[in-house]
Image (cartoon, grey):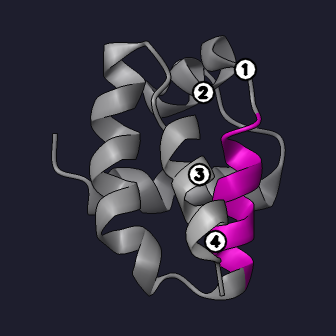
Amino acid sequence: MFSTLRYNRLKWACRRGMLELDVLFMPFVEEPFRKLSEQQQEVFERLLTCDDPDLYAWFMGHQSCDDPELAAMVKHILDRVKV
């Protein structure tokens, strides 16, 4: 379970400064994130450590992610967040 401090840091990390990523991450961390398993939450936290250009390419479908866990999380976020 994420502590309040860890969750708040995670929310801050969701603010990327790139609108296309912000509109995906911010709604996701507010609602669907809390329903993820602990393992999925850790994968999401790891996803946020990736560089913005890579995240943008994965979420916009320009490239696929080589890491299967991260690729599954990208798909999960895209399925959950209606933009």
**Residue 18's spot in the image, x, y percent?**
42, 13
The mark that comes first in sequence, 3 or 1, is 3
| Residue 43 falls in image quadrant | bottom right
Per the model, the C-alpha gap separating discs 3 and 2 is 16 Å
Helix, strand or loop under label 4: helix
Residue type at tag 4: Gln
The mark that comes first in sequence, 2 or 4, is 4
Helix, strand or loop under label 2: helix
Q: Magenta segment: does it hold 56?
A: no
**Residue designated by label 2:** 55
Q: Which residue is at a point 56% across and 19% down the rendered structure image?
A: 57
The image's mark for residue 51 is 1
The image's mark for residue 10 is 3
**Other residues around mark 4 within 10 Å, as few (<14) / some (14–19) / many (≥20):** some
The secondary structure that most of the magenta stretch takes on is helix
2 and 1 marks in contact (CB < 8 Å):
yes
The mark that comes first in sequence, 3 or 2, is 3
Per the model, the C-alpha gap separating discs 3 and 4 is 10 Å
**Residue designated by label 4:** 41
Residue type at tag 2: Leu
